Amino acid sequence: MHQLKSKLANELRHGTDDAEVWKVHTKREKLPLNSEGEIPFFSLTKRLKNENGWDYLFYLTDLPRAADGEPMLVEIDHEMSGALISLPVLGAVGVQAKARRLILALVHALRAEPLATAFHQLDGVGLGRTSYHPGEERDKPSYLTTSGRSGRFRLLVGMVRNNRPGRLLPALSSCIAAAAASGAFGIFYAAIWNMADALSPLRLFMISVLSIGALSAWLIMHNGLWSKTKRHSKWDINEARRDNAATIITVYLSVTIMYLVLYGMLLAGSIAVISTSYLQSQLGHPVGFLDYATLSWLAASLGTIAGALGSNFDQDEAIREATYSRRQHERRKLAESYED
């Protein structure tokens, strides 16, 4: 946030023709969601600007938004010089630079230039094809959307980025404990050594992919992470599909991180506990580091599958909260309360 603030202030000073001194202020504030699961930003713009003495107000949120069946990049209130920017639509790479370029275009548009003309500055920034939609009336917000498969893909990876895969691990303490215990049993069990020695690398890889997938599927279904498809409109259906896709990727990446950590622990344990001579006597051929890596590989896969049992003791709400970004979690809880 500090880096965005300093760079934006410099670009504003160099990007204007007059001698105005630009000051950029940042503030963290969570605006409440309304009954529709949206941020009532424009009903609060005037109050927020007056309280802080700001000329322009740009609110950045991690909440994915949509309009006309397309991801909504920004919604603009020309009269109040404010805009609501959805960060997931910016994707997963270069988010800060894209947000800064977008804010610069918004400042130019709100000061003098026609909005549609100002957004030509966004070409080549990595936002793909954008479409400007003017408000039906002067006092109605206008908005900018991204279109095409690239825009929807960028929104998906942006949601996964905001979910921060790996943040789920602390909520899976019982799952990790069960996986570690089962995996440790594997490195002390000679039958696992012989089985790992007989399996090809491709088969071991497929076993690891399936074990990660099995635990991911269990976590999603057992903890209620799957969004029900709504059929009120085309976007409701797409929204549920997008949420589920982001959930699958987030959970799978989190379990993959857990798997890699588990594999490293088991590899270190096998090297420390199993002597080379004893392992060689069990396998019937000279052994090296690859043999330890192979048996740890299979043990980690078996331990990951066993982790599903331990996940039953983890708190469902903690897992749901760790899976999603803060605002998306609030929106899902709001939707669930209405369904109840």
Image (cartoon, rainbow, N blue to C red):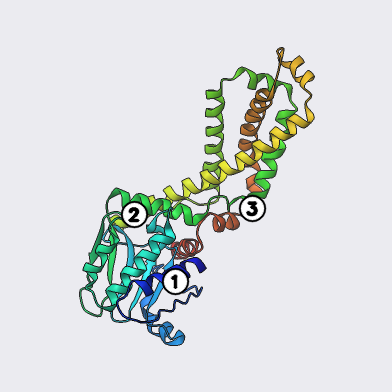
Side of 252 where 121 appears, left or right: left
Percent position (x, y) of residue 206? 52, 28
Is tag 1's residue or tag 2's residue first in the polypeptide sequence? 1
Cα separation between marks 1 and 3: 27 Å
Percent position (x, y) of residue 119? 26, 65
Is tag 3's residue or tag 2's residue first in the polypeptide sequence? 2
Q: In terms of secondary structure, where does tag 3 sit?
A: helix
Percent position (x, y) of residue 211? 56, 34
Amino acid type assigned to the residue bearing label 1 in the image: Leu
Amino acid type assigned to the residue bearing label 2 in the image: Gly
Is tag 1's residue or tag 3's residue first in the polypeptide sequence? 1
Residue in the image at 70% along x and 29% along y? 186
Closer to the camera, 124 or 299?
124
Closer to the camera, 293 or 218?
293
Residue holding disc 2: 126
Q: Which mark is residue 300?
A: none
Instruction: Using the rendered view, name the quadrant where residue 188 is placed.
Output: top right
Residue holding disc 3: 170
Side of 225 where 286 appears, left or right: right
Amino acid type assigned to the residue bearing label 3 in the image: Pro
- State which mark lies toward you, 1 or 2: 2
Residue lying farthest to the top in this orientation? 284
Instruction: Using the rendered view, name the quadrant where residue 140 is placed.
Output: bottom left
Cα separation between marks 1 and 2: 29 Å
- State which mark lies toward you, 3 or 2: 2
Residue holding disc 1: 33
Q: Is residue 37 above or below residue 189?
A: below
Disc 1, disc 3: CB below 8 Å? no
Side of 110 where 246 appears, left or right: right
